[in-house]
Amino acid sequence: MKGFVIYPERCNGCLTCTLACAAAHSSSGDIIGAMLEKVQSRIKIIAVDGFPVPVKCGHCEEPACVDACMSGAMRKDPATGIVSNEGNEQSCVGCWMCIMACPYGVISQGREVPRTAVKCDGCKGRKGGPACVEACHNGALVLEDLEKAGESRQISQYMKIPAKTG
Amino acid sequence: MRYVIIGNSAAGISAAETIRRLNPNCSVTIISDEKHPAYSRCLLPDFLAGDIGEDRLRIRSRDFYQDHNIEAILGKKAMGINTETRHVVLENGETVPYNRLLIATGSITTFPPLEGMDSPGVFGLRTLADARNILKAAESARRAVVVGAGLVGLEAAYALYRRGLEVTVVEKAPQIVPQQFDAIASHVLKKDMENEGIRIVLNTGIRGIAGPTIWERLFGKKGKGVLLEDGGRLKCELVVVATGARPNTDIVKNTGIKVNRGIVVNKYMQTSLPDIYAAGDVAETVDIVTGLQSVTPIWPNAMVQGRYAGCNMAGRERKYGGLIGMQNTVEFREVPAIAVGLTQVNADGYQVLSHYRPENNTYKKLVFKDNILKGAVLVGDIANAGVFSALIRNRTDISQIGDRFMEEGFGYGNFLRKAVRGFSAI
């Protein structure tokens, strides 16, 4: 199965992915429109000790956000594997339980639509696949075969690293 | 194989889905005393406030039971279990045979043993029926009193306020949300509600609820009075009592199933009797923060426990490692807040990092013990809250992180930077 793989060491912090994400989720569909509409990016580039680290939703196998969602809006699509609170029968009420539950911290409070949680929707239905992957010229964000990539994608693997973080 | 689930909310639905996924051909039956298809109790305040209609309370599609080939016996209360013949007995005398049974009966509202609690105009808020009754009473009410400033009480208060009622909240403790939040966070949240126009009376218990006086009755008025311990009497037409809840263990009475506060289950969600499982608010499991066996009555835990119960019932062994018993989010007006795990500590051996900025209503507090994160409070800025939850749940050794915790934007990026690469499945 293919999945998002993040290579933080290849990221140079150009933020193109964030612009591409905002553009893909704006009604105009382009970057200028996204800026005028003040669309928020669903991928974040965090500065850790001066180094850029891309952070985005991993579309977990057993997503904590889905368990936490009290309205039933947050679902994992069994066919595509995409975890999203948009486009499902139930709608988000902005209770922030998913923000409390997500171990990756990649769900945000909606700015455009208040009381709605905003997260990566895998650019479902978008021609050309996820906009951030398409936009990343450094190979920091790629769609790869997860089995080939090989390592465990459990956050606990990272969380239990005893060395100084960052 | 016949699977029977008593309870049609988070734990019950999650278990039913899991059993069906693992075993497409078995028989799955859900029994509930409520007539409605599975709905979210947590959204009842939003419904009460008028933000969402009744159809938006449903947590699954209209055809959920049909699509999953689940027999739903709704509107019939399960009264008892015959563990010898393996039958569930319904209120109308019908029996439902089972091979494996899940008890997911949730919690029920408890009313303090005081005068007037059963009089008209006094409600709890747990079921859709409760919410409908409150709405009906609110139509002809001008003032409401909410007894108890826990999460349910405050959400009910805010909802009734949004419906145009004058609302007063009475709380015995010196702060609101005393179970979840510490004094500073409670203060910020209280200010937020008071700025909206809701009155909050602290440090005051109640003695009971009085009916209308003879004169009020003569003139057809519905006035009630909430009698306070300090001798005062709060006038109102509607009372919501939100002083607590207890696990709904009534069904297992006389079955010999071991009950403490809730139904005691092991790591496989099994009760003390074979082939009977329990999950959700009614079950007692290990709280990973305290390490103690206790009820962990919140929605996400019920969902997860239901899944584990479903797996084990369907024959796929899965060990439940414990979850954080207490974790909640609130946003009444404009200040969002999240509390996870231990947020108030008096004992020795705990370290606390905190940062309070009253000018912009933000507050962050982290509680540690022996280099393990035990609790977190985030007010105003709730980004990355789940990262703290994960550190608490995983009991991660945080000795190397130090006070970087308090840096703005501290989160998964810090861990990802350290790891070679992070990836995910789509």
Image (cartoon, coloured by chain):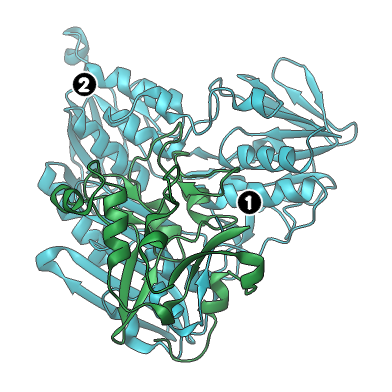
* Residue where numbered disc 2 is placed: B141
Between A38 and A63, the residue placed more toward the observer is A38
Mark earlier in primary sequence (2, 1): 2
Q: Position of residue A50 (x, y in %)?
A: 28, 86
Colour for chain B in the figure: cyan
B256, above or below A151, in the image: above
- Of all chains, the one bearing label 1 is B
Q: Which of the 4 image quarters holds residue B295? A: bottom right
- Position of B90 with respect to A4 (left or right) is right
Between B350 and B346, the residue placed more toward the observer is B350
Secondary structure under the numbered disc 2 in the rendered image: loop
Image quarter of the C terminus of chain B: bottom right
What is the CA distance from the residue labelled 2 to the residue labelled 1?
40 Å
Q: Is residue B174 visible?
A: no
Point out which mark residue B352 bears.
none
Name which residue type carries label 1.
Gln
Q: Which of the 4 image quarters holds residue A124? A: top left
Q: Is residue B317 visible?
A: yes
As drawn, the chain in green is A
Q: Position of residue B371 (x, y in %)?
A: 47, 86
Q: Position of residue B267 (x, y in %)?
A: 72, 60
Residue under the image location 23 percent in, 45 percent down? A114
* Residue where numbered disc 1 is placed: B305
- Of all chains, the one bearing label 2 is B
- Position of B118 with respect to B255 (left or right) is left
Residue under the image location 16 percent in, 13 percent down? B215
Name which residue type carries label 2.
Ala
Using a 10 Å C-alpha cutoff, classify the residue at mark 1 as few (fewer than 14 neighbours), some (14 to 19) or many (20 or more).
many
- Position of B195 with respect to B185 (left or right) is left
Between B150 and B300, the residue placed more toward the observer is B300
Eye-nearest disc, 2 or 1: 1
A52, above or below B382, in the image: below
